[in-house]
Image (spheres, rainbow, N blue to C red):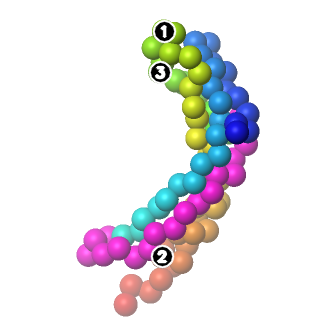
Amino acid sequence: MPIGTCEWDIAEGDVYPATYTFEVYEAKTGRSLATFPIASSGSADASCPPTVNVRPGEGRVAVAQSFTEQTLASMLKPFVMQDAG
């Protein structure tokens, strides 16, 4: 069920809740460190991209609800702040 709508000059779209999956890798070795989900939490307005590409007659566009930068930063902080040891 959509949480809101986006409107552009050429189209409209529905904003749907989403879950994003992130994978964290060690830069030096490429070793996988973690995988974690982040549930969408942004407002419908914040989730709407500034532009959209659609074909004439394509109809409504589906837009994934965004998440906040603060949420992603808090999930990544333990990896950034670890000792290099």
Magenta residues? Answer: 26-45
Tell which circle, 2 or 1, labels the residue nearer the N-terminal end.
1
- Residues packed near mark 1 inside 10 Å, few (<14), some (14 to 19) or many (20 plus): few
To which residue does mark 1 refer? 56
Query: In the structure shown, which secondary structural element does the residue marked by tag 2 occupy?
Result: helix
In contact (CB < 8 Å): disc 1 and disc 3: no
Residue type for callout 3? Asn
Q: Nearer the viewer, residue 60 or 80?
A: 60
Q: Nearer the viewer, mark 2 or mark 3?
A: 3
To which residue does mark 3 refer? 53
To which residue does mark 2 refer? 79
Count every numbered label the image shows and give the total: 3
Q: Which residue: 70% across, 29% down?
A: 5
Q: Quick check: can you spot residue 54?
A: yes
Query: In the structure shown, which secondary structural element does the residue marked by tag 3 occupy?
Result: loop
In contact (CB < 8 Å): disc 2 and disc 3: no
Residue type for callout 1? Pro
**Depicted 2 relative to depicted 19: above or below:** above
